[in-house]
Amino acid sequence: MRIKPGFAVTTVLVWASGYPVGALAVAVAPPFLMTTIRFAIAAALMALIALVTTASWPRGWQLAHTCVAGLLVQACQFSGVYLGLRMGVPAATTALVISCTPVLTAVVAAWVFRVRIGPRQVAGLVLGVAAVLFALWDRLGSFGGGAVFTVLGMLGFVAGGVYQQRFCRDADFRSANAVQHAVSVPVVGLLALTESSPVTDWRQFWLTVAFLVLVNSMGGASLFLVGVRRGGAAAMTTLSSVVPSVTALIAWPLLGQVPTAGVVAGLVLGFGACWLGTSTPSSSVARTAVEERASGG
């Protein structure tokens, strides 16, 4: 199956909104404390939804794989991203780093599933890199000392996406989302114990956490799980190539940052990258997964 345009647009908007809102959150609260509370609330709400809608829950090895994917996509990615934001990495620059995931994910997924990257997908990846560079050309040097944590978060996203496609494609997104957030709570919670700075604005803290829980944790993570199941990890991460430009547009009214001409160019190129990357059929990957299950792999 392919990822439909409406689904892609919704996913991009949800993902892009998380960076400026996340920046507002960590500006008034320790990053690991905020992330722990966000994950705990998201896990409880998604578990309630899964129970009410009688979703099937992962068991045995599927449960173990779901936990590993959750630790990579949730705990590793967001701990790195928010710590980087706290240490001064701009929200748009964070989006730049995360937007490197399409190339890495496509290469890793092709190696894991032993499939060739087609010409359309290659063209999509090239356009994606160009979109990112155009959107953030004037901010390429704005990484600061927290860049290493941002890169760590990006690597967690790549590894988690490929792992999700390899081992968790059959998991129900409602219960899987609950499990992945729940298993990440104690890991990030232990890191929160090392923080000593207080929350400086409780109103802003709870408003941003509520947004991040409802829109990004519950909405964004569920969209990611469904998208990986439909189109594969490489197609889903291709969507991140347009995220920096959309992030910059959202940051305009929210943070007062006026978009540059590069942002507009990046937006156009990014949409082209998304169209090429997400329209590439994933039947070869699906066949590989079916063959592996049939052979007991």
Image (cartoon, rainbow, N blue to C red):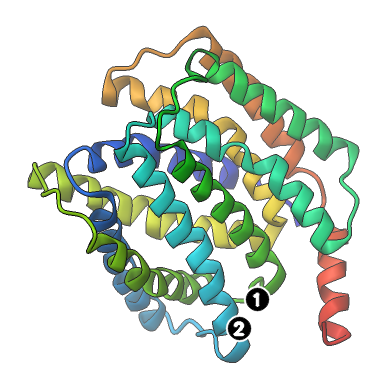
Q: Quadrant of residue 165?
A: bottom right
Which residue is pictured at 31% across the width and 50% down the height? 212
Q: Would you identify the image quadrant in which residue 219 lies?
A: bottom left
Q: Residue at x 33, y 17 (%)?
A: 257
State the separation of the CA atoms marked 2 and 1: 9 Å
Q: Would you say 221 lies left or right of 197 here?
A: right
Between 275 and 205, the residue placed more toward the observer is: 205
Q: Is residue 46 visible?
A: no
Q: Which residue is mark 2?
A: 62
Q: Is residue 3 left or right of residue 264?
A: right
Mark 1 nearby-residue class (10 Å; few <14, some 14–19, many ≥20): some
| Residue 266 in picture, x, y percent from top left | 59, 20
Look at label 1 and name its amino acid.
Asp
Q: Secondary structure at mark 2?
A: helix
- Placement of 45 over or under 104, stated as above or below: below
Instruction: Name the image quarter holding residue 111.
Output: bottom right
- Residue at mark 1: 170
Answer above or below: position of 211 versus 171. Answer: above
Q: Earlier in the sequence, mark 2 or mark 1?
A: 2
Q: Position of residue 46 (x, y in %)?
A: 37, 71
User: Residue 15 location, x and y as percent?
Assistant: 46, 43
Residue ranking furthest to the top: 261
Split into 4 quadrants, where in the image is the C terminus? bottom right
